[in-house]
Image: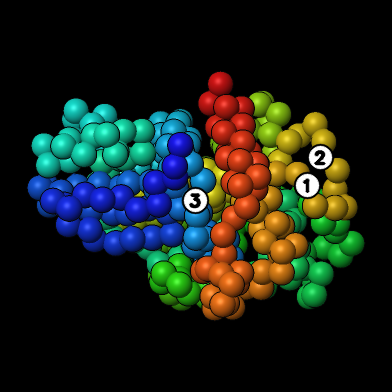
Amino acid sequence: MAALQHSDLPDLQLISKGKVRDIYATSSPDLLLFVATDRISAYDVILQNGIPDKGKLLTQISLFWFHKLQPIVPNHFITANIDEMPLEVQKYRDQLEGRAMLVRKARVIPIEAIVRGYLSGSAWAEYKKSGTVHGIKLPTGLLESQKLPEPLFTPSTKAEQGAHDENISPDRAAQLIGQALYTQISSLSLQLYAAASSHASIHNLILADTKFEFGLTHDNQLILIDEVLTPDSSRYWPLESYEPGKPQPSFDKQYLRDWLVGQGFRKGLESGPEGKEGEGWVIDSDVVNGTKERYAEAVRLLTR
């Protein structure tokens, strides 16, 4: 089955096209249509080919988490049932089934709300260099992939398409969005992480870190938006093979990132003449299949 790289809904107004999601206006001024395509990005670059059915897997796991975490914070989800969507949306049923959500419109808070329970990725890189994570001082002697003394809220900027997110300190994030809103978001993010991490551990998974996004409704209610706790936005590790002091096998995009780097990919390069750098990169078929298998396994384990 071919990957759906781009949605094609000519009678709907396309509002924005992100790394994965296409967002459309609907006949209701308060509702948007989110379409999860099969595009995949790494290092903030959208790769040339996608992962078949990835958008459906992301939608399935987001729906699971939106429902499970509703008691902690309200979210933007309205329905994934095409029959319950506006008539102008229903005509595209064949394209949208399993990968579309009707959601409440919200004003996006311009930070990525990242929670880290383990020392990995960019946090490990910073720690090795300075003993800090997002400017937060940590104890000396921690190992790669080690569980942190307590989960950390570590925000980043929310970059425009084609730009790179930037890790920032809590103080800087509070300056950007205001102290009261920052305190509310950091508290909610830690609560969400604790609930999700507990659920993951029951199903023999470690939730090493994750990223949440929040928005404000027209009446200034803070809600959870976009996707939630998918392999695109979260680092899941198998619990049974966990061993600190080294990288862990994962159910997220790290598998794809590792392959890209091994092939010579370097973050920030433009497309080369052979399509081997930046946005021109094509994922090998075995890596496409391997990535899809990891996403599907994460969904199976978490939602069983």
- Mark 3 → mark 2, Cα distance in angstroms: 29 Å
Question: What is the number of callouts on the image?
Answer: 3
Q: Nearer the viewer, mark 3 or mark 2?
A: 3
Earlier sequence position, callout 3 versus callout 2: 3
Q: Residue at x 22, y 58 (%)?
A: 14
Q: Check disc 1 and report the residue beneath it.
A: 248
Counting from the top left corner in percent of width and height, residue 93 is at 23, 34
- Mark 3 → mark 1, Cα distance in angstroms: 24 Å
Q: Which mark is residue 266?
A: none
Earlier sequence position, callout 3 versus callout 1: 3
Earlier sequence position, callout 1 versus callout 2: 2
Q: Amino acid at mark 3?
A: Gly
Q: Quadrant of residue 143?
A: bottom right
Q: Residue at x 46, y 53 (%)?
A: 39
Q: Check disc 3 and report the residue beneath it.
A: 50
Q: Check disc 2 and report the residue beneath it.
A: 242
* Relative side of 59 to 168, left or right: left
Q: Residue at x 75, y 68 (%)?
A: 125
Counting from the top left corner in percent of width and height, residue 227 is at 43, 47
Task: Check whether the beta carbons of the residues at disc 3 and disc 2 lie within 8 A of each other.
Answer: no
Q: Nearer the viewer, mark 3 or mark 1?
A: 3
- Mark 1 → mark 2, Cα distance in angstroms: 7 Å
Of 248 and 273, nearer the camera is: 273
* Relative side of 242 to 302, left or right: right
Task: Check whether the beta carbons of the residues at disc 1 and disc 2 lie within 8 A of each other.
Answer: yes
Q: Amino acid at mark 2?
A: Tyr
Counting from the top left corner in percent of width and height, residue 169 is at 59, 72
Element class at badge 3: loop
* Relative side of 298 to 67, left or right: right
Quadrant containing the C terminus in the rendered view: top right
